[in-house]
Amino acid sequence: MTASLLVLTAALLSWKTDIEAKGGTRLLVAEVQHQAERNEFTLPAETPGRELFAEYLRQDQFMRQFSLMYAVMIHHKSPAGNAYLVLLNGAKRSDWEAHQEALLAHEFGHAWLKSEGYPAPVLINNQWACVGIHAGDITQHVLIRAELDRRAIDHRTFWFRGMDLAATHLETAPPPPESDRCARVRQAAQLVDVRLGVKPGEWAGQGRYEAAVRRSMPEIESTVAAIVSYVQSHDMADRAQHRAALQFVFEKLKDLGYQRTNEYRVCATLELCSHLV
């Protein structure tokens, strides 16, 4: 398995050209390959811009989040180079291989928004990296979904397949431990995406998925409802409103991570914790 297997379709090549022309920033793509025996992530030697990608593979907090993702886009700025870096998780290749265009198009969307001047959180390499990552995702995914539809790139087949798998996992796995606060942040962001992006009747598995979320993590509901209401009432295409939404979402996800939501307050003051199991 080598970097040469990441072949861009005509639609992706056209979009890549547009993104690079807009701001003069390179868009680089790499599959981060995974050695299961050693649980080690590596980059092929022939990866263009390898030294830029490698910087992130050395960050423990980043890799902890990346190992849970299919892919991620990073706007890299340093004296060594300025680039949009798209990293694909080779450990999950069997899940995304048949949907490579959809996966790459989604990450190209994040680079496109950066090239268009939309704000994004600064990635801080600490235990709260997940808050910034998912706050940015929530606000940007609204615009990315619309752009992928406009470019006639099928992204929903892969998305709904992934959500069906997520429902199965939620139905069979125990709730995350209280110490894993990023799990709740991640799940809240996923549910927000579903409620903002799925049209009525479009995905047959939505009811099953939402029921599984309620069983596994009922404590995220007020956070999700507040974020969905805010985003729906603001124009994410307006850069000032987009920035305000990003700040709002960040604070809501941070409160969830720090257990400062209404559900946790009720639990602490009235000892009504039976619904949080």
Image: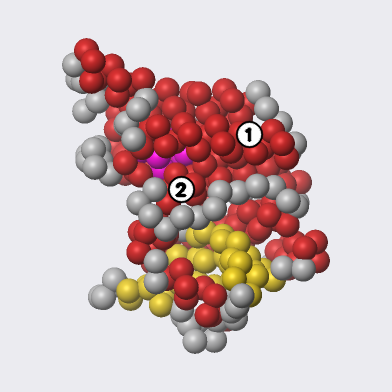
Query: Can you tell which quarter of the image residue 82 is in?
Result: bottom right
Identify the residue at horizontal 26%, vertical 75% (top origin): 38
Dot 2 or dot 1: first in sequence order is 2
Q: Position of residue 207 (x, y in %)?
A: 44, 28
- Contact check, label 2 and label 1, Cβ < 8 Å: no
Q: Which residue is mark 1?
A: 244
Kind of residue at disc 2: Gly
- The answer to whether residue 234 is left or right of residue 90 is right
Observer-nearest of 71 and 200: 71
Regarding mark 1 in the picture, which secondary structure is present there?
Answer: helix
Regarding mark 2 in the picture, which secondary structure is present there?
Answer: helix
Q: Nearer the viewer, mark 2 or mark 1?
A: 1
- Tell me the distance, in whole angstroms, between the alpha carbons under discs 2 and 1: 30 Å
Query: Can you tell which quarter of the image residue 111 is in?
Result: bottom right
Q: Up-down: is 14 above or below 138?
A: below
Task: Specify the farthest residue to the front.
Answer: 79
Observer-nearest of 108 and 253: 253
Q: Position of residue 180 (x, y in %)?
A: 28, 44
Q: Up-down: is 155 above or below 253?
A: below
- The answer to whether residue 85 is left or right of residue 97 is right
SS assignment for the magenta stretch, majority: helix
Other-residue count near label 1 (Cα within 10 Å), few / some / many at <14 / 14–19 / ≥20: some
* Total labels drawn: 2
| Magenta run includes residue 185 | yes
Residue 94 in sight here: no
Residue 235 in sight here: yes
Q: Position of residue 7 (x, y in %)?
A: 62, 73
Stretch of the chain drawn in magenta:
184-190
Identify the residue at horizontal 40%, vertical 32% (top origin): 255
Q: Which residue is mark 2?
A: 162
Q: Position of residue 161 (x, y in %)?
A: 48, 47
Q: Up-down: is 139 above or below 43?
A: above
